[in-house]
Image: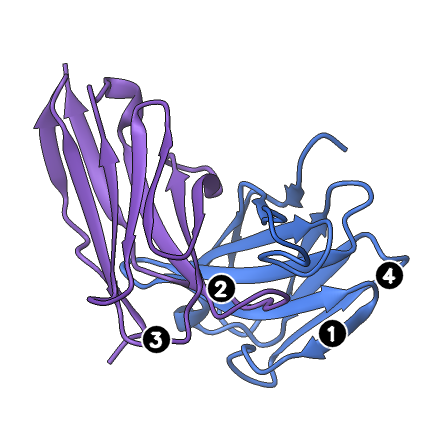
Chain colours: A purple, B blue
Amino acid sequence: QKEVEQDPGPLSVPEGAIVSLNCTYSNSAFQYFMWYRQYSRKGPELLMYTYSSGNKEDGRFTAQVDKSSKYISLFIRDSQPSDSATYLCARAPGAGSYQLTFGKGTKLSVIP
Amino acid sequence: GAGVSQSPSNKVTEKGKDVELRCDPISGHTALYWYRQSLGQGLEFLIYFQGNSAPDKSGLPSDRFSAERTGGSVSTLTIQRTQQEDSAVYLCASSLGLAPQTTYGANVLTFGAGSRLTVL
């Protein structure tokens, strides 16, 4: 079983929709969770970063971690065509850990 | 520099040839990472450097892969006797210290655009 599972999609939504992207993980030692966004032919860029359970908001983006169910989510409100990209979840065991484990990524298309 | 720079952006080579991929990290970033992104496989960790040292090379797929970093800055990933299964995007990233963080708060990876390798 992969340590981080992510539905690869593709996911297509109309502009303005609320998008929900999800990952599950298997190792309860994971403490740090990240969402990266990757545009075509570009490297991933950090979007959200969370430590511990609960929600974290940044503008139209909300990252949610549920450690009891080992589930992490990214919500995008009022989605825009510029949000069209591949979204990768990642985790790390703890502070000082150099090795991030990534999900395979979910490809999102927001249709105008 | 302003960001992580990788070269070449695209490389097409014949099976059996050697290739070198270069990464120029953000100035002042002591940690440097190589990842590989294959179609449908996500990002696979290869190796990381703290300064010029590579404490963990366990992610390298085979002994045909090697990497070095000089002057605490530029890194080169070398693939010898390339095989078709080596075709992928090779991503380099750097961070101020050991990622994801050395203290509470983000100390996260900044990725380059990648080097796309195609082995014919």
In the visual, does A68 lie left or right of A47?
left
**Vertical relation: A63 (above or below) B48:** above
Residue of label 1: B54
Do circles 3 and 4 both sit on a common chain? no
Q: Are marks 2 and 3 on the same chain?
A: yes
Q: Nearer the viewer, residue B37 or A50?
A: A50
Which kind of residue does numbered mark 2 sit on? Leu
Identify the subunit bearing mark 2.
A
Alpha carbons under labels 2 and 1: distance apart: 16 Å
Callout 3: SS: loop
Distance CA(mark 4)–CA(mark 2): 24 Å
* Labels 4 and 2 touching (C-beta < 8 A): no
Q: Which mark is residue A100?
A: 2
Task: Check the residue under mark 1 and report the chain it is in.
Answer: B
From the image, tell me which residue sits under label 4: B70
SS at mark 1 in the image? strand
Q: Amino acid at mark 4?
A: Thr
Q: Nearer the viewer, mark 1 or mark 3?
A: 3
Assess whether mark 4 and mark 3 are in contact (beta carbons under 8 angstroms). Answer: no
Q: Which is more foreground, mark 4 or mark 2?
A: 2
